[in-house]
Structure formats: C-alpha cells, structure tokens
Amino acid sequence: MKLPQCEIIYRPALPEREILFVSGGRRPNKNWFVEVAKDRKIFCADKGIELCRACNILPKILVGDFDSAENSALAWAVTKKIPVERHAVDKNLTDTQLVLERAESLEKNFCAIMTGSFGGRADHLFSTIFTCAASKRKIFLADEREIIFYVSGGENVDVNFFRKPLALSLMPMSEICGGVKISGTHWELDGTTLAQNFPTAVSNRVEDDKIKISVDNGTLAIYFCFDENFSADNFF
C-alpha cells in the first residue's frame, strides 16, 4: 500500500485491488486526497460527499443516513448520477460500517484506504478503529497528518518512509499481542507481549528510513503521527 508519506509492504502480500473510503470526519489536505484518489474506486459515507464535491471526484456509491451532509452536496451527487443509498437515522450500524458492508457486497477482494476518519468525536473514532481492526480486509486509516494500519499474527511488514513521522505508537486491538517485533525505531522490541488494558508502547521515535514490524499472535494497530497541529484547517 503506497501513501504519500510512506509505502507499507506486507508479507504475505495484500490484494492488488485497492479502494478508497471517504468518511465525514476531518478533511484531508486537498492535494493529498487527490493523489490518493487517483486510480482507486471510491466508496463514500454521508458527509464525505462534501470532500468529493470540493475536489470534483465522483465516488462509485454514496451511503448513509445523511444527518450531517449538506443538502447542496447531496444535490450535487444526484446531478452527477452517483448512486445514493439512504438509511434511517435510527439504525444499528454506523455510516462507516454501512459503507464497509456495501463494499463487501460489490467487491470480491480488496484492501482499502479510509480517509476522513480522524478529528471530531472520540466515540466515532473508537468505533471506526475497532471496526476496521475486525474487518477481514486490510484497511488503512489515513490523511496527511495521521495513519493507522493493522498487523495480525503471522504477518511481517516493512514500512519505507518518504517522510518520517513525529511519533509511532503500537496499540493492541486484541486482548494480548504476542511476539511483537519492531526495528528501526528508538525503542526496539523483540518478541514482546503487549496488553490492550495497559498500552505502554506509545510515542516511540523512528530512527531509520525503514522499519520492520511483525506479530506472532493477536492484532496490533500501528499509529504514525506526522503533524501535531490538528487545529489548523489546511484543506487547501
């Protein structure tokens, strides 16, 4: 998976088909989004349609209850003949879960980037992080400021940086992550066990242009922070 900040290489390899999910959280930088959207099929959730309209990028489908998207953005989607699937506001699944479910029904095998996930309410981000961790597809939460991706038991991952992050953290998504190894960082690990209820492997530093990560068992979220100035609106 290649992103503007880095390339993430899995062994075993990821599926070649890559799609892009656009959610309604903090908008990524416009240039970053246009680069990531290139040559990828786009699935849009609710307010994410505002970002697509701003960049004149047409998603394959728009899904949500539309309790937050601007009416003008929805009208633009209709004008552009983008298929719109409206759900009731009172529902069991979040808009993110609905768009993931819809992609599963339309695409046979894929990995994905999800942007517009950060910022906003903590409960929404919590739901998205754990929903993507539990998905049978590899999903990378990303914008120009932050990236989260997942490494599961038996996987080995190399990350080649085009731009080094300010910080790197390891966040267990399962109760225990065993046999965690990471090299190329200030604090390296070699067969360490990390516990979800006592997350200590945070705020590490990247020392090299490349790091290696592997996990024997469990699912581990890898977090990169590239910009701590989250208050400024740098969409354009």
Image (cartoon, rainbow, N blue to C red):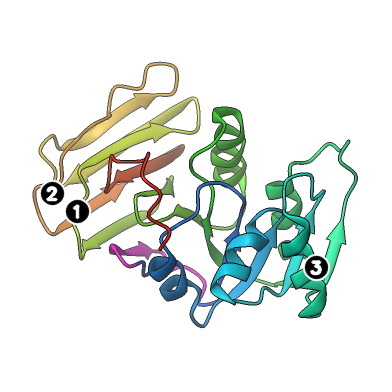
* Residue 128, quarter of picture: top right
Q: How far apart, in angstroms, are the residues tagged by discs 1 and 3?
A: 45 Å
- SS for callout 3: helix
Q: Which residues are magenta?
A: 4-15
Answer with the quarter of the image where residue 106 lies: bottom right
Residue 126 spot, x, y in % from top left:
56, 32
Sequence-wise first label, 3 or 2: 3
**Is 7 a magenta residue?**
yes
Q: Residue furthest top?
A: 198
Extreme-front residue of the structure: 72
Q: Residue at x 85, y 61 (%)?
A: 85
Q: Position of residue 68 (x, y in %)?
A: 73, 46
* Residue that numbered label 2 is attached to: 184
**Residue contact at pointers 1 and 2, CB within 8 angstroms:** yes
Q: CA distance from mark 3 to mark 2?
A: 49 Å
Which residue is label 3 attached to?
75
Q: Secondary structure at mark 2?
A: loop
Foreground tag (3 vs 2): 3
